[in-house]
Amino acid sequence: MTQHDRHTSQFIRNSMAQKMLDAETEHELALAWRDHRDEAALHKLIEAYMRLAVSIAGRFRRYGMPLEDLIQQGNLGLMRAAEKYDPDNGARFSTYATWWIRASMQEYVMRNWSVVRTGTNAAQKKLFFHLRRLQARAEDDPTRRESISASVARELDVPADQVELMMGRMSGPDLSLNTPQSDGDEGREWMDTIEDDAAPVEDAVLSRIQLDRWREKLRVAMKALPEREQQILRQRHLTDEPCTLNELGVDLGISKERVRQLEERALGRLRDRLMPPGTARAEVMQ
C-alpha cells in the first residue's frame, strides 16, 4: 500500500469513528453557523457527518471512479448542504446532507464517466443510474413480452428512443478516433471515416473572392451617391443597430417622410450601379 493509500484509509477510519450528533446538538451548531457564521460550529457539523460521504461514496464505486475523488465530491456536497440548511424547517441535517452528497457524486460521475456527455437532462440521468439494473432484470424475466428498451422505458417513464440511445452509449468504453480500424490496417483510422461536411477549400476561396468583389463594387457605388444619401444608407442598412426614420430626420433636420424618400432614391441608384449590364430592374428586384 502506498503512502497515499494509507492516508486515504486513515481518513476513512477517522471519519467512520466520528459520533453522530443528537438532534439538539445538531440544531445548535446549525443555528450558530447560520446566524453567527461560527466556523468552529461549522467544522463540528461537517466533521460529524463526513461518514455519510464515505458511506455513499462506496455505493458509487461501481462506476469506476476513484474512491478518494468520490469522497472529495461528497464532502463538497456536505459543505453545500451546511451552507443551505435551514435549522428551523424541522428536517434533520443528516437527512438534508444525504441528498446533497448524493447529488454531488452523481454530477461528478456523469461528468467523468465518459468523454462524451452522457446525461444532460433529468430523464438521461435517471437512465444512467438505473439502466443496467433494470436491463438485467428485464433480461431475466421469462414473462416479458416487450423489448428490453420498451420495458425500461415503461419502468422509468422515459421515451424508448432515449433508452436505446443510452444503451448504445453504455455498451462499451470510449475509443479514440485515432484508433486503427483493424489490426491489419494500421494506416486507416476511425477519424478517416468521418465525413467532412464543410465546403471544399476551392469553393470557400471562390466565395471569399466573390464577396470581396461585391464589397468593392458596393463601396464604389456608395461613394458615387450624395453624402446625405450615403449617411442614410449607412445608418439604416450598414450598422448593427439601424436608426429609425424619425431619428435620422432629427439628425438631418428633415421630416421622416423626406428621409424615406431619400433612402428609396439611394437604394434605386445602388441597384442601377450594381446590376449586370442588360438586366432589367424588375429582374434584380425579384
Image (cartoon, helix red, strand yellow):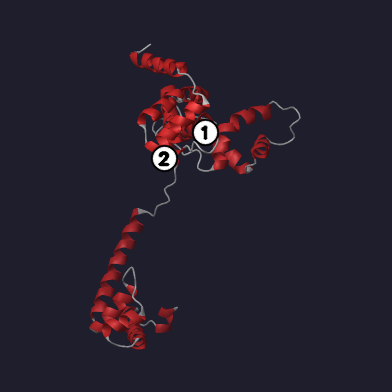
Secondary structure category for the residue under label 2: helix
Q: Is residue 111 visible?
A: no
Give percent across and percent down for residue 81. Answer: 46, 35
For residue 20, above or below residue 171:
above
Q: Residue furthest top?
A: 1
Secondary structure category for the residue under label 1: helix
Q: For the residue carrying disc 1, how many other residues have a C-alpha within 10 Å: few (<14), some (14-19), or many (20+)?
A: some
Horizontal side of 188 relative to 95 (left or right) equals: left
The quarter of the image holding the N terminus is top left
Q: Nearer the viewer, mark 2 or mark 1?
A: 1
Of the pair 32 and 236, the residue shown nearer to us: 32
The residue positioned 76% from the left and 30% from the top of the image is 143
- The residue where tag 1 is placed is 96
The residue positioned 31% from the left and 84% from the top of the image is 249
Amino acid type for the residue under numbered disc 2: Asp
The residue positioned 25% from the left and 83% from the top of the image is 228
The residue positioned 41% from the left and 15% from the top of the image is 9
Give percent across and percent down for residue 195. Answer: 44, 46
CA gap between label 2 and label 1 equals 51 Å
For residue 46, above or below residue 4:
below
Horizontal side of 50 relative to 138 (left or right) equals: left
- Classify residue 241 by image quadrant: bottom left
